[in-house]
Amino acid sequence: MSIGNPATAPARTDLPWLRHRTLRTTSTATTNATTNATSPATSPAPARPLPTVVDFVNGRARRPEAAPAAPQPVTPPPAPAPASSATSGTSLDLSAPSAPTAHTAPPVPAPAPEVSTSLDLSAPSTPIAHPAAPAAPAGPAAPAGSTSLDLSAPTAAPASSTATAGAPNAPTTPKPSRSAQRAYTPTRTRRGTATVLNAATPTVTLTRIQSGVGALAISAACSDAVGDVRLGCAYQLTGDRSSVIQRASGLTEAPVGTRRPVMAATKDRFETLTIDLAQVRDLERFVVYLYSESGQPLRWGGTLVVETFAPARIEVPLAAPESTGVLVALSGYNVDGEIVLRNEDTVVDGPVRAATAAFGFDRISWLDDHTPLT
């Protein structure tokens, strides 16, 4: 089926009623007349005739327009709800507090907050001052029985007049710190007086001048009644060099074979050990002991005398029961350039080898119990 051109198509005769049909307006006019007669005071607008279908098809009529919509009444916005009270509200009040009314009267203490059952996260509002005579405050009252989550800062309590009018506090003496209480004060020598090392005062610390100038002389002042007592010293130098110096075994210099010995063993009236303090940096520690060369029991007595260049004199009593062992009388340590001397007063049952090992000199090689390997 093909569709031809409408302009050249033959005229149709089967639709005459569409071409000759007209709109009946008689009934409409009659109705309008009747309406006008019954209500003369009202003048309605004449009715608009509806276009016929034929006019619309032929293009002589336009599509009827829709009637404009009636305007809707403007509804006023709802009035804002009054702010709930901070003391009796039951809602989540997050609004800022209203500014209080200013008065010329002096402020009074804020009353205690009332019981609240709301989640109050706002800052507490400033109470309104009232012109009343200020009374003595009784202190801030804690909100009893509150069931709300109160995150606001507590109200500051007013200063009491009785507290300010009281007598001032007496000044307190600050307590010394623990470090000051535990600070160690070393015992020093006194000029012109010998320092005796005993159980009450077992140690003494030489000053840097006494430890670094001249020589340190250690003498065993013992009589013949004691026995054949001999003096010796076990030492440790820097570099972990350890050995023994004792004149009875022919070891008179330490270290052996050096041109500038740190220690030397001599005898004048008594056997003496001399330490060159110019080389004190090479000396770490030492112990001075006394023993019997023949192995016979010794009836201990006498004094071990230590003298410095400063001068200073230190005495160590040799008071021990009669024995055949080795008496370790004195020990010395180089602590940050200062020599610390300590009274040991310990008798070790055994030879020199056992006595030196008891004080940590266990790296010395020995030929026998009294002679080290050099």
Image (spheres, rainbow, N blue to C red):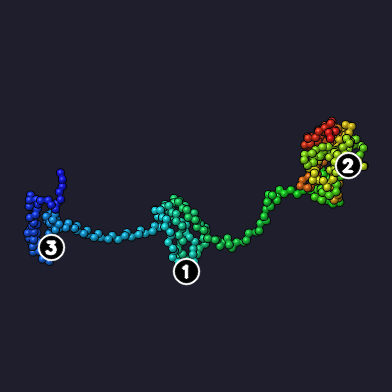
Identify residue type, mark 1. Answer: Thr
Do we see residue 317 in this rendering? Answer: no
Is 205 left, or right, of 182 in this rendering?
right
**Residue 84, quarter of the rendered image:** bottom left
**Labelled pair 1, 3 in contact (Cβ < 8 Å):** no
**Secondary structure found at label 3:** loop
User: Residue 114: x percent and y percent?
Assistant: 44, 55
Which label belongs to residue 46?
3
Residue 220 or 281: which is nearer the viewer?
A: 281
Left or right of 133: which side holds 39?
left
Dot 1 or dot 3, earlier in sequence: 3
**Residue shown at 46%/64% (left/top)?**
129
Q: Quadrant of the N terminus?
A: top left
The local secondary structure at tag 2 comes to strand
Q: Is residue 107 in view?
A: yes
Judge whether 135 appears above or below 197 on screen: below
Residue 31 appears at what percent x and percent y? 8, 60
Q: Which numbered circle lies on residue 189?
A: none
* Residue at position x 84%, y 30% in the image: 368
Q: Looking at the image, which is closer to me, 26 or 276?
A: 26
Residue at x 17% of width, y 56% of height: 63
First of labels 2, 3 by sequence position: 3
Vertical order, 146 against 350 (above or below)? below
Under mark 2, the amino acid is Thr
Looking at the rendered image, the disc whose residue lies closer to the viewer, 1 or 2, is 2
| Disc marking residue 104 | 1
Instruction: Mark 2 and mark 3 in contact? Answer it, CB < 8 Å.
Output: no
Which mark is drawn over residue 272?
A: 2
